[in-house]
Image: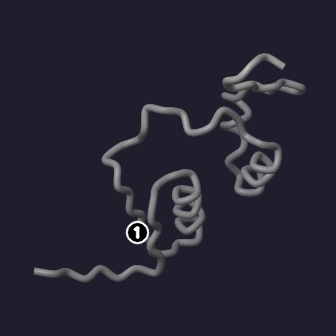
Amino acid sequence: MTSVIETDVLIIGAGPAGLMAANELQKRDMDFICLEQRSGPSELSKALGIQARTLEIFELLGVHQEFLKKGYPGPGSKLHLGGENP
């Protein structure tokens, strides 16, 4: 048996972009479905930091305060992965 579900928008993936899209669609009272392959959130971090432009976009979307509360500013910090020390 096949069933058909109609929606205005289908979001594939509940990563940062998919969830942000879902958030914005919900604010606009649009019908959407968000599909994710995994059964729950990952236990692993997906980012070591947030770029300044990303924080600007978060501010436009009204979600920046939570990031500012929980984040750690690192002006002038450097991150080195693998290899020799500079």
Place of residue 57 in the rendered image (x, y in percent of width and height, measured from the top left): 76, 54
Q: Residue at x 42, y 38 (%)?
A: 42
- Image point (40%, 69%), residue name: 33
Label 1 SS: strand
Image side of residue 81 versus residue 45, left or right: right
Quadrant for residue 3, please give it.
bottom left
> Which residue is the extreme one toward the front?
84
Image height check: is 39 above or below 60?
above
The image's colouring method is one colour
Q: Position of residue 64 (x, y in %)?
A: 72, 44
- Residues 19 and 47: in front is 47
Residue at the extreme top of the image, as rendered: 85
Q: Residue at x 66, y 32 (%)?
A: 48
- Please indicate whether residue 67 sits to the left or right of residue 38 in the image: right
Q: Residue furthest right?
A: 76
Closer to us: 70 or 52: 52
Residue 19 lies, in percent from the top left, at 52, 56
User: Image height check: is 42 above or below 6?
Assistant: above
The C terminus sits in image quarter: top right
Q: Quadrant of residue 74?
A: top right
Dot 1: within a 10 Å radius of its alpha carbon, few (fewer than 14), some, or many (20 or more) residues? Answer: some
Give residue 9's position: percent from left, percent from top: 47, 76
Residue at which label 1 appears: 33
Residue at image position (74%, 25%) is 80
Say whether residue 14 is left or right of residue 3: right
Q: Nearer the viewer, residue 12 or 55?
A: 12
Q: Amino acid at mark 1?
A: Ile
The quarter in which the N terminus is drawn is bottom left
